[in-house]
Image (cartoon, rainbow, N blue to C red):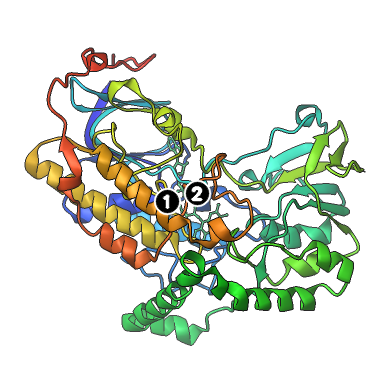
Amino acid sequence: MTVRTGVLIIGTGFSGLGMAVRLKQAGIEDFVVVERAGEVGGTWRDNTYPGAACDVPSHLYSFSFAPNPDWSRSFSPQAEIQAYLERVAGDFGVRPHVRFHHEVLAAAWSEAERRWRVRTTNGDFEADVLVSATGALSDPAIPSLPGLDRFEGTVFHSARWRHDHDLTGERVAVVGTGASAIQFVPQIQPRIGHLTVFQRTPPWILPRWERPFRPAEQWAFRHLPGVQRLARAGLYWGREQTVAGFVVAPGLMRAAERLARRHLQRSVPDPALRARLTPDYRIGCKRILISNDYLPALTQPNVDLVAAGLAEVRARSVVAADGRERQVDTIIFGTGFHVTDVPVADRITGRGGETLKRHWAGGMRAYKGTAVAGFPNLFLLVGPNTGLGHSSQVFMIESQIAYVVDAVRHLRRTGGVVEVREDAEAAWDAGVQRAMARTVWTTGGCASWYLDDRGRNTTLWPGSTWRFRRRTARFDPEAYQGVPENAANPACRTPPTLVNSPAT
Ligand SMILES: Cc1cc2nc3c(=O)[nH]c(=O)nc-3n(C[C@H](O)[C@H](O)[C@H](O)COP(=O)(O)OP(=O)(O)OC[C@H]3O[C@@H](n4cnc5c(N)ncnc54)[C@H](O)[C@@H]3O)c2cc1C
């Protein structure tokens, strides 16, 4: 049986849940949310590693429409954020719309039916509008290392933490020193036998100014909503002030570098270790990390920092790029995600049978990070160039959601199909890349996961978040074209069929 719906949303992280809530608030109820996992939460359901927490303060890293007076600390731990998202799903009536354990395997635009046909692991759907909210940091990336498949110990990625595996007393290799590793390394270091941390490039680390909220503050947040709104606005504008250093004048970042150097000096007394931990690129070029306990953990006698990547894995050992071999029982990869090669791109097929992956062969691009030429009635949340280096991703997500809700309203009014014009998409992308040239991500002298394999930054928004909000405030049909019925593309005359779909 094929389920027919108005809007199909893929994913139940901040993006998919926020989209569902806003559709409901707009009076649109005929939508379904499909989720491959068994609970909502996305990032916060999956990243359960010890020490997992947000690094943007919670009063800002949350939905504007669902303030939470009960955050326990300025940067909430994973379990609290996950509980918050589960509560949002319940309180706003999203749950009845969600189909868990439905992984989207293929979504194809049917030219004849002028709608999306979607095949999942648990049934098929047809939808007028498809919203992909599958996340940019959702699919863990493990480097293909020679010998990894022959390793006889335990291997896992930080986003799929093996809580059933006891690390006590073990020899552990941690690969990567990014945002996740700096959170879990200090948590596991005291109980493991020996820890080897493989660091390709040292991150810049700033102090983590955090504290628990006092009961009086929580009382005020709960009973005087203006106080919480004020706190959120203060956090928002405080962060927004730093954007110039990222996007127009990286020289402004020198003050932050001085702060980070002092933090390093105070945390690591040994000059040789400090030298290995001192970055040689401008702060902000890679994601700025915040931690008070990572650097001290590296000074402990059971820790060895290898300032080189991992080159090879053997049955019971790992070999660094400098040739030294170390015996290990467990390897933990803190190596990030498929960001510029999101797997869902290979599963979405637009007009003419072209997949999003093929369309993006020259690099990801999307009009306003949201719409793609050749893919009618498809909207991406956290699409290309919508990520941030300085503030809350939820702000960008809410901007995109407002735009998509307006687009859905437009489609309902006009009864049509919209597809962004190629020239509008190209002009948007050219503008983004022009602005990118001045940013710290381009001029800062580092390689980062923000860049694709051509060195093009297809992940971050090179501007202020309020500028993005202004640009996405309203759906702009003038940037779109209608898609005529029975479009002349010969490749599309036969309605595309979904392989193995019982409905076709
Ligand atoms: C450890 C960690 C910490 C972070 N901390 C911060 C922070 O402090 N501040 C900040 O601004 N950002 C942070 N981020 C970025 C974070 O990813 C975003 O802020 C936000 O959570 C993204 O939400 P999302 O809904 O777009 O994606 P996700 O939360 O990744 O959700 C995507 C959902 O789609 C589902 N899905 C994917 N593919 C399919 C498919 N084919 N079929 C069905 N379902 C599918 C997934 O299961 C998942 O539930 C962090 C990321 C990580 C990994």
At 73% from the left and 79% from the top, the residue drawn is: 262
Residue 44 percent across, percent down from the top left: 52, 53
Q: Is residue 50 left or right of residue 402?
A: right
| Residue 271 placement (x, y as % from top left) | 87, 71
Packing grade of label 2 (10 A; few <14, some 14-19, many >=20) is many
Q: Tell me if residue 2 comes above or below residue 243 in the rendering.
A: above
Q: Which mark is residue 415?
A: none
- Could you say which disc has been placed on residue 457 in the image? 2
Q: Quadrant of residue 113?
A: top left
Name which residue type carries label 1. Gln
Label 2 beta carbon less than 8 Å to ligand 1? no
Q: Which residue is mark 1?
A: 433
Q: Nearer the viewer, residue 11 or 464?
A: 464
Q: Is residue 57 in view?
A: no
Residue 233, relative to residue 339: is it above or below?
Answer: below
User: At x 81% / y 47%, what residue is drawn?
Assistant: 173
Q: Is residue 428 visible?
A: yes
Give the farthest residue toward the bottom.
216
Task: Determine the residue positioned at 72% across, 74% down.
Answer: 261
For the residues labelled 2 and 1, say whether their Cβ atoms are less than 8 Å apart: yes
Q: Nearer the viewer, mark 2 or mark 1?
A: 1
Task: Label 2, secondary structure: give it.
Answer: loop
Q: Position of residue 191 (x, y in %)?
A: 82, 58
Q: Amino acid at mark 2?
A: Asn
Q: State the separation of the CA atoms marked 2 and 1.
A: 8 Å
Location of residue 411 by image quarter: top left
SS for dot 1: helix
Kindly indicate the quadrant of the structure image that contains residue 206: bottom right
Q: Is residue 86 above or below residue 150?
A: below
Task: Name the quarter where the N terminus is drawn.
Answer: top left
Q: Where's the C terminus, which quadrant?
A: top left
